[in-house]
Structure formats: C-alpha cells, structure tokens
C-alpha cells in the first residue's frame, strides 16, 4: 500500500517551496536504501550467499543427489587437502607460474612503459597494440598458443628447429610437465604485459620532469635516472601491480585447461583446475569447496602481508 | 659556441626517439604476430595448417572456414547468444551500479561503511571459489542452461566492481549543482536522472566497456552451467569445437575471429576511456 505513494513522491519531485520538515527528513532517511536495494539484493544472492554456503559445504561429505543425506565431517576435507600430494603439486605448479610470469610481466611492462614515456610518433597506436592481447578472450589466445606450440608443424618448433637450429628435434611442448608450464607462462606474460605497461605508464607520466632534468644535469645516465628518480616515485604503483599480478596468477585456469588439460598424468595441474575436476568430474563438492578455501587462505595471507608492506611503504615514502 | 651543445642535445634526442620507436615497433610486432598468424590461418584450408615453412599469408586463401563456421556449425547462433548475454548484462549492471554508486557517494546513512566494505571484500575473492555453491544455487533456481541465468550471475559478479568504479565519479559532481536543483524542488530521482547521469557519462561508458567485454569473454561459468548446445556462448562453443575437431584449426580460428571482431570494435572505439579507466583505478591518490 505504501510503495506506490513513495515512488510518486520520489519521481515527481517535492512540491515547490519548503516541504514540512518531518516529511523531508523521513525521505532522506529512506532514499539511499531504495537506491541500494536492487544491487545489494543481487550481490547478496549471487556472491555473499554462495560464499557462506561454500564454507558450509566444505565441512560436509556433500551428497550431490538430493535424496541422499550429506554428512558433517568437520575439518576432514581440509586435512585431506593438506595430505593430498596432487594438491601440493598443483600449488608448486602455480608457484612456478608466479615466479616466471610476475617478474616477466613487470620487467617487460616497465621496459615498454619507459620507452613510451616520451613524445613519440605513433605513441597511441603502440599503446593500443600492446593492450590488444589483454582484451582478447582467454579461450581464443589459449587455443592460439596451443596451435603455435604444436609438436609437429607448430610455428614455435619451426622457429627453434628449422630457422634458428637451437634444438635438434621438435620439442613436444605440451606433452611434458616443464615445457608445458613454460608454454603456459609464455602465454601469461604475452597476454599480461599490456596491462602492467598501461599502469606503469600512467604512473611514470606523473613523475616530475624537473627532478629527472636535474639528475641529468648532475650527470646521471638514463639507467641511473630511472633507478634513482623514477622508480622510487612510482614505488606504490609497483607494489600495487605486484599484488594484482600475484592474485591474478593464482587464478590461472583457462590456459592450463585448454592447453595441457593438466596433463600429462596431472603433472601440470594448478589448484583451480584440480579443484574444478574434483567438483565437476568427481562431483566431490565438499572436497572441492575445502580446496578452494585453502587456496583463498593462501591468497588472503599473501595479500595481507603485501598490503602491510604497501602501507608501511606509503608512510615511508611520504616522509 | 652556444649552438653546439644545443645541436648535440637535439641530435641526441632524435637518436633516442628513433631508438625508442624501433624497439617499440619490434616489441609490438612480437605481440601482434600471433594474431596475424591466427588471422592468416583462418583463411587456410586444412591441407595448409601445418605446412613447412609456416606462412603468415595463405598461399591459396579461402573463406570457406567462415561460411562453414556460420552455417553448418551454428556460430551465427552462438554469436547472437553472446551478444544477448553481454548487452543484457551491461544494461543490468549499469542500472544497478549507478544507483548504488549514487547512494554511496551522495548520502550518509547507517550501515554505509559496512555495506561498502562488504562489496569491496567481494572484489578480493577469486570468483571461481564460489563456483560450487553458485552451481547449486543456479540449479535450485532452475537457471541451468539459461541465457538469462548467465545474465543474472554475470551481473551479480560485476556489480561490486562497477559500483566501486562509478562512486568516485559521482563524488566529483560539485555539491553546488546538487543544491541548486534541490532549491528548484528536484527530488533525488530527478537529480539522479537529469544531473548525475549526464555528468558521469564518460565513466558510464568506461564501465559499459568493461562489463561488456567481461561478459562477452566469460568462459568458466558458462562452461559449468550450459549443457544444451543451442544455449552456448562463443567462448564455450569455440572450446567445445576445438575439443571435438582437434585438427580443424582453420575453422577454430575463423570462429575465434568472429568472436574477436566485436571486442576490437568496442576496444578501438572506446580505447581512450578504457585506458583512462584502468589507469585511474590504479594510480590514484
């Protein structure tokens, strides 16, 4: 009964002149909630509720079939995860991915950003081109790299074997653990450098050119100017990029799924592909939820530590 | 005497510019080469897929991969499915997130900080962690195998980030304009529609690009909940096609090109706003 009246009041605008005080106060009290309600309701339904449900499921031997009853088993799923060699292997693999792709994206992205940080012809064009892999779907680029890394007749092997003669046989890239991980890392760096470049470039353009000029007059070369002037000035951005790349690295999933399928024999599995298999191949929802929480805890701890460094550093930089 | 150092600096700057451009050109070539190779391969017939040496430009180009992909392999349908999902998601997210951003930026109310913190917390968590309970929820709601189900879950997933992005722009609207409209007797809805929305239009465009691309490219959730081949979106259709016909790369890449074209259009048209959006999210004080 009340709703239509309220809507009319909101839409029609208040009557001209000063409205009675009490009415005005009540409206300002309810208005923000009316604006928030639809979005918050959707967020709660699709994000908040599933998140709490996920925690609940992780403590059960969850029965997928509705007629069977799920059994509460406490921390058993978590203990099983901690003792699961395959899970630790997947963590080691994502560790390798992080160790290769995070410094790779930072170094190359920074290099490109420094090159672009000047008045140049075609600057906008370069920026667009470098960012192109970032906006392209993971599915398309993962399949593209699978094709490029094909053992017989693939373009990468042609370059290494027929053109440069660096290897004496065609490398079975995606059929072995280390070469498979390397191929996936190559894709991760190729797809990601544009993002770190754009962020670094935005930060570098904010670095005072007077400082750089002063350093140049003092005889500092380009490398010294970069290390002593630019790098300290963009320290916070650098830390931000590191945090985001590490969180993003833990999310590696589609490239593994489509390029190696976690194989051969599970040797290139990463936590998310392993979790996904537990959930939707073996229908072990309880175990999959526990694995995802173990991963979330690792990510949360790493982010927490980094954000602390972030904050201390910000304070340090301000002084 | 005085002209020599100046001329030296001038030459040095030109050499430096030339070196920068050369290095950048080489770098962008390396980054773009895989795309060019993919585009070339999409015009090759099966016989030339693994030719030695590999050719960037096909020797005997054919458009048959495109016609086959669109006609007998249903990619026209998948394209429309993706378009429907991405456009609907963008619309829903823009409506919900802009109203939320307005409330957070322009009102003080009990529970504001807690609500905003909860939204931010949702941003930190990798979405895939919730995939099991979300799957159960979608199944309970009868939203498996449903394009509208995809829209609902994509919108819910994107709304927090978009609210966060838009809030800063709503905050920048001068309070004096808001006050002037209040004096004219405008209520919050009229202010929202005829003052705030027009003023934050660039931010809305940025948010629309992000949301559209996110929904257009999404793979994991669609893979999990879509079983009916008629309901496939482009990413899962392409992956499924490659899985079934592992050697028909020409067709796979023709389908991929079809999927990439709208992304390119959206990105190139909106790239200035897009880049500004990324940079503003990261480097702000």
Image (cartoon, coloured by chain):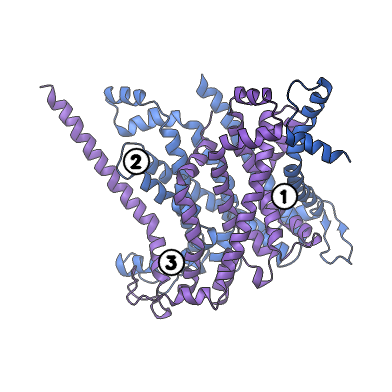
Using the image as rendered, state which of residue B58 and residue B126 is in the foreground.
Answer: B58
Residue reaching furthest top?
Answer: A319
The purple-coloured chain is labelled: B
Above or below, comparing residue B235 to residue A199 in the picture: below
Question: Mark 2 — residue?
Answer: A115
Q: Which tag is nearer the camera, tag 2 or tag 3?
A: 2
Question: Mark 3 — residue?
Answer: A148
**Badge 1 local density, few (<14 within 10 Å), some, or many (20+)?**
some
Q: Earlier in the sequence, mark 1 or mark 2?
A: 2
Using the image as rendered, state which of residue A163 and residue B29 is in the foreground.
Answer: B29
Image quarter in which the N terminus of chain A is found: top right
- Residue at 29 percent across and 31 percent down: it is A221
Question: Mark 1 — residue?
Answer: A293
Q: Quadrant of residue B222?
A: bottom right
Left or right of A260 on screen, residue B107: right
Q: Colour of chain A?
A: blue
Measure how far apart labels 3 and 1 are at the Cα level.
Answer: 35 Å
């Amino acid at each position: 009964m009340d709703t239509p009246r309220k809507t009319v009041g909101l839409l029609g605008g208040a009557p001209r002149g000063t409205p009675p005080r009490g009415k005005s106060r009540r409206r300002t009290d309810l208005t923000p909630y009316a604006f928030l309600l639809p979005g918050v309701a959707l967020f709660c339904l699709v994000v908040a509720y599933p998140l709490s449900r996920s925690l609940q499921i992780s403590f059960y031997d969850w029965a997928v079939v509705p007629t069977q009853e799920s059994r509460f088993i406490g921390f058993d799923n978590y203990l099983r995860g901690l003792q699961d060699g395959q899970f630790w292997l997947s963590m080691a693999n994502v560790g390798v991915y992080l160790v290769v792709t995070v410094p790779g994206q930072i170094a190359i992205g920074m290099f490109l950003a420094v090159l672009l940080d000047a008045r140049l012809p075609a600057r906008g064009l370069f920026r667009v081109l470098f960012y192109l892999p970032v906006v392209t779907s993971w599915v398309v680029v993962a399949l593209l790299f699978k094709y490029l890394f094909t053992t017989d007749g693939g373009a990468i092997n042609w370059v290494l074997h027929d053109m440069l003669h660096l290897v004496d046989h065609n490398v079975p890239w995606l059929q072995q653990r280390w070469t498979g991980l390397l191929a996936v890392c190559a894709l991760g760096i190729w797809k990601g450098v544009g993002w770190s470049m754009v962020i670094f470039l935005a930060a570098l353009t904010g670095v005072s050119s007077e400082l750089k000029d002063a350093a140049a007059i003092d005889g500092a070369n380009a490398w010294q100017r970069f290390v002593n002037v630019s790098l300290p000035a963009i320290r916070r951005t650098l830390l931000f990029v590191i945090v985001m790349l590490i969180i993003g690295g833990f999310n590696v999933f589609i490239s593994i799924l489509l390029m190696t399928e976690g194989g051969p024999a599970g040797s290139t599995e990463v936590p998310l592909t392993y979790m996904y298999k537990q959930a939707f191949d073996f229908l072990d929802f309880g175990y999959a939820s526990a694995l995802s929480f173990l991963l979330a805890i690792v990510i949360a701890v790493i982010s927490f530590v980094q954000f602390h460094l972030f904050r201390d550093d910000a304070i340090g930089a301000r002084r | 005497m005085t002209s020599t150092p100046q001329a030296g600096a001038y030459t040095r700057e030109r050499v430096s510019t030339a070196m920068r451009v050369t290095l950048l050109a080489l770098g962008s070539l390396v980054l773009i080469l895989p795309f060019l190779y993919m585009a070339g391969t999409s015009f090759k017939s099966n016989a030339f897929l693994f030719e030695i040496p590999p050719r960037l430009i096909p020797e005997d180009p054919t458009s048959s991969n495109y016609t086959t992909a669109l006609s007998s392999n249903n990619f026209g349908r998948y394209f429309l499915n993706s378009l429907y999902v991405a456009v609907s998601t963008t619309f829903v997210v823009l409506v919900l997130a802009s109203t939320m951003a307005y409330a957070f930026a322009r009102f003080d109310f009990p529970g504001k900080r807690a609500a905003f913190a909860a939204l931010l917390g949702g941003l930190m968590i990798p979405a895939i962690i919730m995939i099991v309970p979300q799957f159960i929820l979608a199944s309970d709601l009868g939203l498996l195998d449903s394009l509208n189900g995809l829209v609902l879950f994509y919108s819910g997933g994107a709304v927090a980030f978009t609210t966060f992005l838009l809030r800063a722009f709503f905050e920048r609207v001068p309070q004096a304009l808001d006050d002037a409209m209040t004096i004219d007797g405008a209520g919050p809805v009229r202010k929202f529609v005829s003052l705030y929305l027009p003023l934050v239009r660039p931010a809305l465009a940025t948010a629309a690009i992000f949301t559209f691309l996110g929904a257009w490219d999404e793979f994991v959730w669609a893979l999990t909940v879509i079983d009916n081949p008629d309901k496939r979106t482009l990413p899962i259709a392409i992956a499924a096609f490659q899985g079934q016909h592992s050697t028909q790369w020409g067709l796979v890449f023709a389908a991929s090109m079809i999927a990439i074209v709208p992304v390119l259009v959206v990105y190139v048209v909106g790239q200035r706003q897009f880049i500004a959006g990324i940079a503003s999210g990261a480097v702000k004080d």
